[in-house]
Amino acid sequence: MMICSVVGHVWATKKEASLAGLKLMVVQEEVTNQRGGETFVAADAVGAGIGERVLVVTGSTARRALGSDTLGVDCAIVGIIDALEVDKENRENRERSARGATVTKKVV
């Protein structure tokens, strides 16, 4: 799964028949040290809107999430993120280490 932001809609009046009725959205990956923030189209299985952060799956998992292995879909929105908690101290230390800064651990 990937964390993405919904950045737009896709309107396609002519498309492959299996895509009829699917809501297509433009999503952008969150930039991490593993991923580069690519933008792509995803079929929406949960009713996401522009500006929301979402969970996205790809490949056969995306087709299964939409209920059919025969759909012409490679990416699907499967969840809307309400909140996301990350271990802030560890993340900040990793970012400092990546920049070459000295990491000091707090002792409480």
Image (cartoon, grey):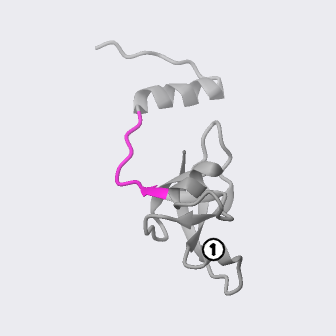
Q: Nearer the viewer, residue 11 or 63?
A: 63
Image quadrant containing the C terminus: top left
Q: Residue furthest left?
A: 108
Q: Which x, y percent locates residue 75? A: 62, 57
Q: Nearer the viewer, residue 104 or 69?
A: 69
Helix, strand or loop for the magenta stretch, by majority: loop
Q: Secondary structure at mark 1?
A: helix
Q: Residue furthest top?
A: 107
Does 83 lie within the magenta span?
yes
Amino acid, disc 1: Leu
Residue, x 43% and y 69% (percent of image)? 47
Residue 84 vertical position relative to residue 67 in the rendered view, above or below: above
Residue, x 41% and y 36% (percent of image)? 86
Q: How many marks?
A: 1
Q: Mark 1 — residue? A: 19
Q: Nearer the viewer, residue 2 or 22?
A: 22
Does 43 lie within the magenta span?
no
Q: Which x, y percent locates residue 24? A: 59, 72
- Span of residues in magenta: 78-86
Residue, x 62% and y 57% (percent of image)? 69
Label 1, residues with CA under 10 Å away: few <14, some 14-19, many ≥20: some
Q: Which x, y percent locates residue 84? A: 39, 45
Residue 25 lies in quadrant: bottom right
Residue, x 42% and y 28% (percent of image)? 89
Q: Which x, y percent locates residue 38? A: 68, 54
Residue 1 lies in quadrant: top right
Q: Nearer the viewer, residue 5 or 42?
A: 42
